């Protein structure tokens, strides 16, 4: 269920917040075909072997719903001590990569076993990750104007300078009011509509003042996005998410080309405490992420612990409400199955990490299942790739542990059958 809300423009001290192409194909031309979605599919590598070549325009192959069903699967494993681990990427060859600070670990068997830690680079920090589905490159984008790029599914990494352009409010460039990219769900490559091939990720405008946590400056913090149409060399900062006091978010693309943006809301105008809400705030883009509109509240999904009041309790207080949640569209052909992760508790404690499922593009969320009953916090979602060892798997990386919500980084691996439990998926697909 959803609730539409009206957003007003707020002004203070003169600042207002408002809320086909030709390409050269390498190797034998018989190794490529054009599918019904107008995507060029690589059928073999440059030597004629029957496998995709890294760097070819493979796109994100949409699988079938049956891949995520079958016998229920659920694995839970501690990955690291301390905070972090919010970036998880499944490379085009099916390698699952988990990034933690300046190193990564990988799984070649769909998340059952993991490698030792592998160092990436000296200044790998404060980034968000994205897989470029057009060429297979993995980017770790930093808001100060550089990224670390891997052309070979995470094996080797090179540092590159990039350009980040500000939005119409002059927010987002490194030499002005900068972006924040950490504590976001990894970005996505758009696969539908007129902006197909665009790279996009959630971002945040935060430091609009020397002390952005002080009222009224919290009113001018906002979620937004950055997007690139040149494979990550240049990024454009978007217009604001249509509500202020927001930050830390996730973007999923629906099959009709709309973008679904879920955002944490830290701060509410303290002059109107009756408007404090615990429901998830989300909005849409109809132009590939350049503008965000149609703000709604979900009556099914929480934005972190549900406690909202003027009196601070634990980690919940105005300026620190909400919690980053994961958001993912399963790569299933012809279906808009969305997953959302966050804690599910009526009190102020960060605990009871839960996953919800929608089978109608986020209109309703009829399925949910508890993943971890203890203290838990930030989370991020990923999915396996058809035709690889990761096929049919769902990945949930999250902070949590017996010692506290930020004491460890854990990974849950499961499939849709486990999430459904004893429910029949046809009951939801036929609605």
Image (spheres, helix red, strand yellow):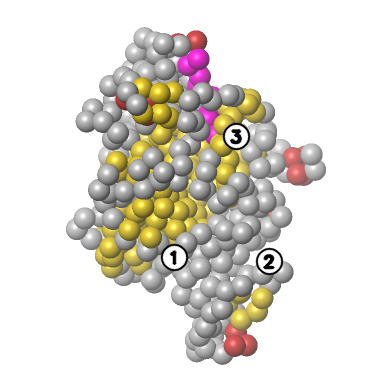
When the figure is inspected, residue 375 is found, relative to residue 24, above or below; the finding is above
**Separation of marks 2 and 3 at Cα, in angstroms:** 28 Å
Q: Residue 130's quadrant in the figure? A: bottom left
Q: Residue at x 52, y 83 (%)?
A: 24
Classed neighbour count for the residue bearing mark 3: other residues with Cα under 10 Å, few (<14), some (14–19), many (≥20): some
Q: Along the line of sight, which residue is nearer the eye, 321 or 409?
A: 321
Secondary structure under the numbered disc 1 in the rendered image: loop
Where does the N terminus fall, quadrant-wise?
top right
Q: Residue at x 45, y 11 (%)?
A: 273
Where does the C terminus fall, quadrant-wise?
top right
Q: Which residue is mark 1?
A: 230
Classed neighbour count for the residue bearing mark 1: other residues with Cα under 10 Å, few (<14), some (14–19), many (≥20): few
Residue 88 image position (x, y, % from top left): 42, 52
Q: Along the line of sight, which residue is nearer the eye, 170 or 320?
A: 170
Q: Which residue is mark 2?
A: 37
Secondary structure under the numbered disc 3 in the rendered image: strand
Residue 388 image position (x, y, % from top left): 54, 66
Q: Residue 11's quadrant in the figure? A: top left
For residue 29, side relative to residue 101 (left or right): right
Residue 352 in view in this figure: no
Task: Indicate which disc, 1 or 2, sits on the residue closer to the N terminus.
Answer: 2
Q: Along the line of sight, which residue is nearer the eye, 151 or 391?
A: 151
For residue 59, side relative to residue 184 (left or right): right
**Separation of marks 1 and 2 at Cα, in angstroms:** 21 Å
Q: Confirm whether the magenta stretch covers residue 128.
A: no
Of tags 1 and 2, the one toward the viewer is: 1
Classed neighbour count for the residue bearing mark 2: other residues with Cα under 10 Å, few (<14), some (14–19), many (≥20): few
Of tags 2 and 3, the one toward the viewer is: 3
Q: Which residue is mark 3?
A: 294
CB contact under 8 Å: marks 1 and 2: no
Tell me which segment is drawn in magenta.
Answer: 275-282
Q: Along the line of sight, which residue is nearer the eye, 327 or 344?
A: 327
């Amino acid at each position: 269920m959803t609730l539409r809300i009206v957003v007003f423009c707020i002004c203070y001290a003169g600042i207002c917040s408002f809320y086909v192409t030709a390409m050269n194909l390498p190797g034998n031309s018989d190794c490529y075909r054009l599918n019904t979605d107008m995507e060029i599919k690589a059928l073999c590598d440059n030597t004629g072997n029957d496998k995709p070549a890294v760097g070819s325009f493979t796109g994100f192959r949409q699988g079938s719903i049956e891949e995520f069903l079958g016998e229920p699967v659920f694995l839970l494993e501690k990955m690291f001590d301390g905070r972090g681990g919010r970036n998880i990427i499944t490379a085009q060859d099916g390698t699952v990569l988990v990034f933690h600070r300046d190193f990564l670990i990988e799984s070649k068997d769909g998340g059952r076993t993991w490698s030792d830690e592998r160092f990436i680079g000296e200044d790998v920090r404060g980034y968000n990750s994205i897989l470029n589905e057009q060429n297979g490159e993995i980017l770790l984008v930093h808001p100060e104007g550089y990224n670390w790029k891997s052309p070979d599914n995470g094996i080797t990494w090179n540092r590159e300078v990039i350009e980040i352009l500000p939005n119409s409010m002059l927010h987002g460039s490194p030499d002005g009011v900068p972006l924040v990219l950490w504590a976001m769900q990894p970005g996505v490559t758009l696969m539908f509509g007129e902006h197909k091939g665009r790279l996009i990720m959630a971002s945040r405008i935060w430091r609009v003042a020397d002390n952005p946590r002080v009222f009224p400056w919290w009113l001018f913090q906002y979620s937004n996005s950055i997007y690139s149409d040149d494979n990550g060399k240049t990024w454009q900062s978007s217009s604001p998410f249509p509500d202020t006091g927001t930050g830390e978010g996730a973007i999923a693309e629906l099959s009709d080309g709309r973008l679904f943006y879920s955002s944490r809301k830290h701060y509410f105008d303290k002059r109107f405490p009756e408007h404090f809400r615990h429901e998830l705030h989300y909005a849409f883009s109809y132009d590939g992420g350049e503008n965000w509109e149609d703000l709604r509240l979900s009556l099914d999904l929480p934005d972190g612990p549900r406690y909202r009041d003027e009196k601070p309790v634990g980690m919940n207080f105005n300026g620190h409400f909400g919690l980053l949640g994961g958001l993912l569209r399963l790569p299933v052909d012809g279906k808009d199955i969305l997953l959302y992760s966050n804690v599910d508790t009526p009190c102020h404690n960060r605990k009871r990490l839960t996953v919800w499922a929608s089978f109608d593009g986020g209109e309703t969320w009829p399925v949910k299942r508890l993943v971890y009953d203890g203290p838990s916090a930030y989370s991020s979602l990923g999915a396996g790739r058809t035709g690889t060892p990761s096929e049919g798997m769902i990945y949930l990386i999250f902070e949590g542990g017996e010692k506290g919500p930020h004491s460890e980084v854990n990974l849950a691996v499961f499939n849709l059958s486990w999430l459904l439990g004893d429910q029949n998926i046809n009951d939801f697909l036929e609605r």
